[in-house]
Image: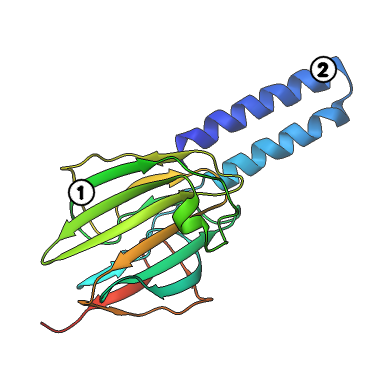
Amino acid sequence: MVVDGIYYALASTAGGVLVSYLTHPAYGIPLFLLAAFCLYFFRDPERVIPGGEVAVAPADGKVVALEAEGPGQTRISIFLNIFDVHVNRSPIGGRITDVRYHKGRFLAANREEASRQNEQNVVVVEGQDTQVTFKQIAGLIARRIVFYKRPGDAVGAGERVGLIKFGSRVDVFLGPEWEIQVRPGQRVLAGSSVLARRKTR
């Protein structure tokens, strides 16, 4: 459980108790339901991280795009709806070399334009003979991107690095050294689903 969920749930519960006390118990029910949803939304289950030279999904959700981005680079876009786990994880192990926050719009995260126009946090991870970039992208409802790490921090593949509150999108950029293992429409789980494998060197 992400601690934010506990705070939101406590605030909603307190509001529900107050409304129930001042008016009628039935009027507090929506706030109690909101508290339950917050606990559900901010869940943070353990995941089995696969071994080997793989890039794992940084987020739960549905692969909505698989596009060529420049010479030999592939972008994999994952859309998270409000029922997905929103904790983000590092696609590979290595060291974070760059973190850049960009202000932007709040288009629906399942739209292609969201990758370029929405508010986002761009993270670069340097691994062994490879570099992987991923973006935490805010959506129509999501207005808060959280990132726990800083440039210079070491991370393991599948390690928790942040979250995006409510519906959102995460893009991953992989170079020509990676063989893509997913397809559009496929659902993936952060930290445990393999997006790509390193090609034979």
Q: Which residue is mark 1?
A: 96
Q: Residue at x 59, y 47 (%)?
A: 40
Q: Position of residue 91 (x, y in %)?
A: 30, 61
**Along the horizontal axis of the image, is 129 left or right of 105?**
left
Q: Which residue is mark 2?
A: 21
Q: Residue at x 76, y 18 (%)?
A: 18
Q: Position of residue 34 (x, y in %)?
A: 69, 38
Tally the numbered discs.
2
Q: Position of residue 125 (x, y in %)?
A: 22, 55
Q: Is residue 48 visible to us here?
A: no
Q: Comparing marks 1 and 2, which lies closer to the viewer?
A: 1
Dot 2: element = helix
Q: Residue at x 58, y 31 (%)?
A: 8
Picture layout, residue 76 above or below residue 89:
below
Sooner in the amino-acid sequence: mark 1 or mark 2: 2
Q: Position of residue 36 (x, y in %)?
A: 66, 40
Dot 1: element = strand
The C terminus lies in quadrant: bottom left
**Along the horizontal axis of the image, is 125 left or right of 65?**
left
Q: Residue at x 80, y 29 (%)?
A: 28
- The residue sitting at the top extreme is 22
Mark sitting on residue 48: none
Picture layout, residue 118 above or below residue 22:
below
The Cα–Cα distance between marks 1 and 2, rounded to whole angstroms, is 50 Å
**Along the horizontal axis of the image, is 164 left or right of 52?**
right
Q: Is residue 62 visible to us here?
A: yes
**Along the horizontal axis of the image, is 64 left or right of 69?**
right
